[in-house]
Image: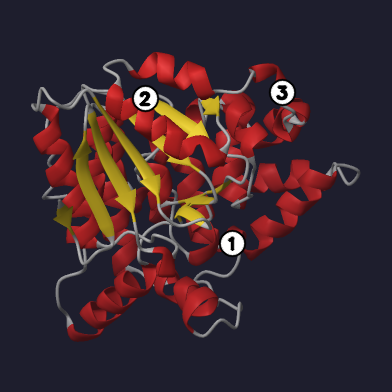
């Protein structure tokens, strides 16, 4: 069994390659050791005839994974900027390569999702072939609220969700539950969380994952999605081509409760991150997955060299005063040329194994 400081457990169990996230004290926030352990395991199992399929789960009841280890990344980047040292890009290089490996994996990759699923947790689950959602799943992409951006493949995945809901999620950081995840396609099946162990036991015994999933999946007609109910309104607002227009359309709908909550949320976000995220959603529609990952690597290089990420993490997670001082502080002061610079090619682009989307 491979281990990364006991934060992740990796084992072969019969026909199953099983990954268990075990960093519950940090809501399974991913660190570099965990990412590299995942890369090694998936690379080894790819050509292992004994492994018919792979499953990833959490051993913590509260969260599948709340994202990346922001405290560690904030500290490493803060001191690198202060001392003129290298930015902490290794984590993102490895994480994005892992996301790409999962997306292109030749064997069934089954994510068992319950509790919090955010950021990096999205990246190690949603790109797999099967996503089983427990009843307590709480999904969000809240990166713009800390001066970051929706990464780990969100550039490719979110624009393909129905009725501009991906753009809505990217810009507002809204949390959604199981029915919304099923309707939007973030999850593929509903399975009670207390049946996850039984799913794993059956996957270990059987060569084909499909009858196992069908055995435990709940009927799709049970889905009651609020996002589906609001799909027309969401699309009417978040299909707009600029943040100014999105805000104006939200302001024109004072009777729409979800829209007013979205308007308030947008007002708290980093203006720069909002502009980046909207541009991502527009560009990502026409990109294959590898192109999207390389684009995200360009953005993260510039984000780590900037200011808002450090200010956002300080305000939300370090000092916890929840009063970030964004630069610039207003969307009207965000210049298009400055946003374009985040997407410009790098001298050293992200290297990926193959270009399949």
Q: Are marks 3 and 2 in contact (CB under 8 Å)?
A: no
Mark-to-mark CA distance, 3 and 2: 22 Å
* N-terminal-most mark, 1 or 2: 2
* Image quadrant in which the C terminus is located: top left
Going from N to C along the chain, the mark reached first, 3 or 2, is: 2
- Spatial CA distance of label 3 from label 1 is 34 Å
Q: Position of residue 36 (x, y in %)?
A: 17, 53
Q: Which comes before the other along the chain, label 3 or label 1?
A: 3
Which residue is denoted by mark 3 in the rendering? 222
Tell me the residue at 70%/25% (across/down): 223
Q: Is residue 140 left or right of residue 276?
A: right
Callout 1 environment at 10 Å: few (<14), some (14 to 19), or many (20+)? Answer: many
Residues tagged 3 and 1 counted as in contact (Cβ below 8 A): no
Quick one: SS at disc 3?
helix
Q: Position of residue 344 (x, y in %)?
A: 27, 46
Q: Residue at x 64, y 50 (%)?
A: 174
Please indicate, yes or no, whether residue 31 appears anywhere in the rendered image: yes
Q: CA distance from mark 1 to mark 2?
A: 32 Å
Asked if residue 287 can be seen in this view, the reply is no
Q: Name the residue beneath numbered marker 2.
A: 129
Quarter of the rendering containing residue 286: top left
**Label 1 belongs to which residue?**
269
Q: Disc count in the image?
A: 3
Q: Is residue 284 above or below residue 88?
A: above
The kind of secondary structure element at disc 2 is: loop
Q: Position of residue 169 (x, y in %)?
A: 59, 43
Say the numbered circle drawn on residue 94: none
Q: Give the camera-side residue of 315 and 333.
A: 315
Question: Colour mode?
Answer: secondary structure
**Badge 2: how crowded within 10 Å, few (<14), some, or many (20+)?**
some
Residue in the picture at 55% in, 41% down = 194
- Residue at coordinates 36% horizontally, 63% vertically from top-left? 23
């Amino acid at each position: 069994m491979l281990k990364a400081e006991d934060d992740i457990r990796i084992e072969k169990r019969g026909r199953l390659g099983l990954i268990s996230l075990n960093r519950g004290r940090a809501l399974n926030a991913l660190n570099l050791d965990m990412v590299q352990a995942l890369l090694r395991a998936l690379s080894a199992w790819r050509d292992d005839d004994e492994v018919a399929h792979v499953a990833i789960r959490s051993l913590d009841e509260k969260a599948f994974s709340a994202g990346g280890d922001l405290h560690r990344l904030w500290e490493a980047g803060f001191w690198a900027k202060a001392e003129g040292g290298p930015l902490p890009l290794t984590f993102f290089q490895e994480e994005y390569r892992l996301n790409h490996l999962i997306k292109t994996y030749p064997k069934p990759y089954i994510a068992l999702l319950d509790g919090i699923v955010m950021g990096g947790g999205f990246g190690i689950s949603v790109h797999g072939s099967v996503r089983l959602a427990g009843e307590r799943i709480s999904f969000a992409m809240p990166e713009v609220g800390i001066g970051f951006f929706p990464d780990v493949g969100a550039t490719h995945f979110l624009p393909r969700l129905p009725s501009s809901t991906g753009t809505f999620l990217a810009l507002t950081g809204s949390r959604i539950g199981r029915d919304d995840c099923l309707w939007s396609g973030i999850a593929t099946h509903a399975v009670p969380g207390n049946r996850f162990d039984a799913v794993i036991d059956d996957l270990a015994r059987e060569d084909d994952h499909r009858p196992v999933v069908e055995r435990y999946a709940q009927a799709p007609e049970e889905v009651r999605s609020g996002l589906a109910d609001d799909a027309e309104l969401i699309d009417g607002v978040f299909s707009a081509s600029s943040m100014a227009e999105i805000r104006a359309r939200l302001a024109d709908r004072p009777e729409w409760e979800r829209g007013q909550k979205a308007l308030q949320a947008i007002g708290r976000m980093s203006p720069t991150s909002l502009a980046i995220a909207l541009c991502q959603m527009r560009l990502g529609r026409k990109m294959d997955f590898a192109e999207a990952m390389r684009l995200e690597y360009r953005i993260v290089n510039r984000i780590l060299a900037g200011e808002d990420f450090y200010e956002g993490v300080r305000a939300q997670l370090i000092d916890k005063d929840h009063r970030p001082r964004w630069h610039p502080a207003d969307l009207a002061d965000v210049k298009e040329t400055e946003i374009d610079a985040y997407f410009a090619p790098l001298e050293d682009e992200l290297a990926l194994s193959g270009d399949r989307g």
